[in-house]
């Protein structure tokens, strides 16, 4: 039987915190009235992440990539293996509390094709904000995204947070988008939103609670440069895709 929800968690060298994450996720899902599956996609970890998942969490589906390919590749693999009616991916550090699934699933149940968490819609929800220099880098990155990728899609200019690692999709939308997606690195979020808008899918933003984890895997100097190279390729990679009228849903206030 098709699960109601598929939760995809990409991981890379997360041996120190994967137990806490999965314990919290499974405890929460067991209290819900719907069926759910959890997929952990190990992006070529060099530590004991995979061993911990397989040994202590038999109810979790472990997907192992043979080498480290990037977060985009890991999420794509998990989303295309998932079977749920709704498919959500979230970060392994649970910077977004798992309880935020409730408003996301509400909107996907209604009329959202894609639902994305945003740290910008309600800053009071940020339990532990990012350091100032990371917020500044984030704003600069968003401006570059607007210029390089979203310039011909006016409705996407309302999206202030493309990089939040908490996004949900209807099953058929996930299948369509992730089969088209090409980027393996951190730029994949922007690519997904670009493809969704070009296809005419309804995108809804919701404010989320969020806590900065100082152990973030994003390298301050290396990764933003790689992301810029990736996002600069998006319009070229998908230049032949059909543009339909996109619909950006109102955020939850």
Image (spheres, rainbow, N blue to C red):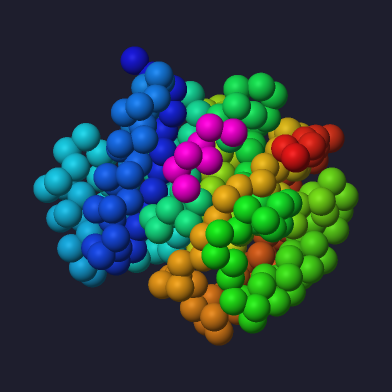
Position of residue 133 relative to residue 90, above or below, is below
Foreground of the two, 97 or 186: 97
Q: Which residue appears at 20% of the width and 49% of the height?
A: 53
> In this rendering, does residue 98 appear at all?
yes
Q: Position of residue 243 (x, y in %)?
A: 80, 40
- Residue at the bottom extreme? 221
> In this rendering, does residue 67 appear at all?
no
Foreground of the two, 250 or 3: 250
Q: Position of residue 239 (x, y in %)?
A: 74, 52
Position of residue 212 relative to residue 56, above or below, is below
- Residue at the top extreme? 1
Q: Position of residue 69 (x, y in %)?
A: 39, 63
What span is colored magenta in the figure?
Answer: 97-103
Q: Is residue 98 magenta?
A: yes
Q: Is residue 136 magenta?
A: no
Quadrant location of the N terminus in the rendered image: top left
Q: Which residue appears at 87% of the width and 50% of the height?
A: 154
Q: Which residue appears at 66% of the width and 73% of the height?
A: 135
Image label count: 0
Q: Which residue appears at 60% of the width and 22% of the height?
A: 109
Q: Is residue 20 left or right of residue 195?
A: left
Q: Determine the main secondary structure of the stretch shown in magenta.
A: helix
Quadrant location of the C terminus in the rendered image: top right
Foreground of the two, 208 or 180: 208
Q: Position of residue 72 (x, y in %)?
A: 49, 56
């Amino acid at each position: 039987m098709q699960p109601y929800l598929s939760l995809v968690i990409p991981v890379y060298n997360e041996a120190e915190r994967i137990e806490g994450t999965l314990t919290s996720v499974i405890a929460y899902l067991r209290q819900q009235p719907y069926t759910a599956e959890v997929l952990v996609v190990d992006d070529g970890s060099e530590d004991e992440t995979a061993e911990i998942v397989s040994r202590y969490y038999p109810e979790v589906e472990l997907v192992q990539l043979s080498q480290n390919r990037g977060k985009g590749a890991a999420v794509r693999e998990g989303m295309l293996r998932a079977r749920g009616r709704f498919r959500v991916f979230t970060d392994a550090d649970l910077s977004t509390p798992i309880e935020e699934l409730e408003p996301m699933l509400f909107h996907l149940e209604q009329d959202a094709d894609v639902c994305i968490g945003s740290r910008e819609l309600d800053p009071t929800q940020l339990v532990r904000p990012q350091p100032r220099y990371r917020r500044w880098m984030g704003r600069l990155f968003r401006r570059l995204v607007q210029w390089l990728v979203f310039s011909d899609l006016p409705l996407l200019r309302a999206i202030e947070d493309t990089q939040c690692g908490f996004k949900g999709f209807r099953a058929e939308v996930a299948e369509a988008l992730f089969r088209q997606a090409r980027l393996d690195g951190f730029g994949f979020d922007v690519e997904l939103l670009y493809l969704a808008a070009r296809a005419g899918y309804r995108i809804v933003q919701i404010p989320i609670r969020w806590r900065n984890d100082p152990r973030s895997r994003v390298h301050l100097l290396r990764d933003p440069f790689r992301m810029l190279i990736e996002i600069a390729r998006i319009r070229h990679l998908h230049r032949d895709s059909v543009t339909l009228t996109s619909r950006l849903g109102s955020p939850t206030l």
